[in-house]
Amino acid sequence: QVDESKEVESIVPSYACQRRTTLENHNTVFTDALSLLAENAELSDEDGRGVAFRRAAAMLKALHSPVTDLLQLRGLPCLGGHSLRVIKDVLENGASSEVEFTKQSERFKALKVLTGIFGVGAKTAERWIREGIHSLQQLQDSAHTLNRAQQAGLEHYDDLNQPVTKAEGDAIGEIVAKAVMSVLPGAQITLIGGFRRGKLTGHDVDFLITHPEEGREVGLMPKVVSWLESKGFLLYQKTTRNSYLESKDGPARPSSNMDRFERCFSIFKLPEDEKQGTKQTETLTDTCSLTTPSLVKDEGSESTKRANLKPWRAVRVDLVVSPISQFAFALLGWTGSKLFERELRRWAGHEKAMSLSSHALYDNTQSKYLRASSEEEIFAHLGLEYIPPSERNA
Ligand code: 8DG
Ligand code: MN
Ligand code: MN
């Protein structure tokens, strides 16, 4: 028999935002399996199932020791029947048959390849697969016209599917800082997303930009983008205005800051020498030529890497501009993880009758917005213990 008191946490809170989840994961064998099923569900328009798997995985990530027996899971939250079956299969057979089956399915493989293109979501990939397109080559051979984002995504496919390192993130941070300081001295830049949580690699680099004087940030994004473009640092960019109005997760927004919240989805051209700290920004546009995309084989990365002599690499970068009055909400909302954010909003709504967004916190009981100038204050408003970024890796 198992001595449960020794091996399991006696109380694990059910919302991820009530738990401390570091990057130290003692249960990767289970969380990898559940994450793959979550991904498959999300790619198959089954978001409900996806969230259930994500919640189960996140709960296991918060445990302080490896699960070695199903009995240890008694009393733990977030484990539905399906997730339990997967865990049981892994415990008994070393792997989940459902996971192995999914991994090998042509559909899943095609969905992965196609959604691996920046600008291609599950819906588009699904449509292409129904037309028999399973590979990049088949996509290129097809008559489909791709939008600007997808063209860039296809062109830089290999680079964008190679994880971004913290060093590369820092190098991009220096470039962004230089751009921002050139167009608005006194503005502040904060690294957000996975790198703020202490991750060593990521799929992109995320930055939040603000200015300590309310209103000075207005119109900043186009200027930053122009500066970056003029120096040859951007391979692609799409700047969008605040979409707060359309968002489903926020309350009706105050009209004053309507179009002050801008973001830019971009692909940076990071010079190799910039990564090593030598600055040659002025000559970038002259020295870098476009390379041909390496799409002949889906898995031709080894040969293409060797043939890849270009002195730069493409990196996905997200920029967000926020007025200082919303900075704490933007910071909390863009630090992630995605599940941590989702759980914060669920907690706010279900447990506190509040609506949390990256702009504001609205108290439905008092019918008023709750101000905050730090993440700590937002946690306090929500009646939650403060969880630092490094422990939001749910
Ligand atoms: P990674 O890039 O290291 O792989 O992971 P990440 O940094 O955690 O993920 P991300 O996809 O870059 O997203 C970072 C955070 O930004 C995440 O918490 C979710 C949040 N976020 C988006 N899109 C949007 C959006 O449209 N609105 C708001 N408010 N937040 C968003 O990714
Ligand atoms: Mn990120
Ligand atoms: Mn991002």
Image (cartoon, rainbow, N blue to C red):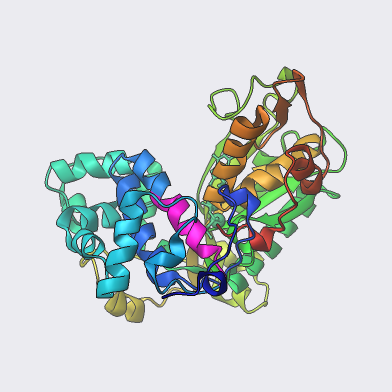
Where is the N terminus found, in terms of image quarters?
bottom left
- Quadrant in the rendering for residue 390: bottom right
Q: Where does residue 189 sit, x and y in percent of width and height?
A: 75, 53
Q: Nearer the viewer, residue 59 or 9?
A: 9
Is residue 262 shown left or right of residue 50? Answer: right
Q: In this view, does 221 lie above or below 162?
A: above
Asked whether the viewer can see residue 230, the reply is no
Given the current orientation, which residue lies at the most extreme front position? 1
Residue drawn at (45%, 66%), measured in percent from left and top? 72
Q: In this view, does 218 lie above or below 88?
A: above
- Quadrant in the rendering for residue 144: top left
Total count of labels? 0
- Quadrant in the rendering for residue 362: top right
Q: Is the magenta stretch mostly helix, strand or loop?
A: helix
Q: Where does residue 94 sit, x and y in percent of width and height?
A: 28, 75
Q: What stretch is highlighted in magenta?
A: 53-64
Question: Does the segment drawn in magenta span residue 307?
Answer: no
Q: Where does residue 268 sit, x and y in percent of width and height?
A: 54, 58
Residue drawn at (30%, 79%), measured in percent from left and top? 302
Q: Nearer the viewer, residue 366 or 225?
A: 366
Asked whether the viewer can see residue 30, the reply is yes
Q: Nearer the viewer, residue 318 or 81?
A: 81
Residue drawn at (55%, 57%), measured in percent from left and top? 394
Q: Where does residue 52 sit, x and y in percent of width and height?
A: 40, 46
Given the current orientation, which residue lies at the most extreme bottom position? 306
Is residue 389 shown left or right of residue 55? Answer: right
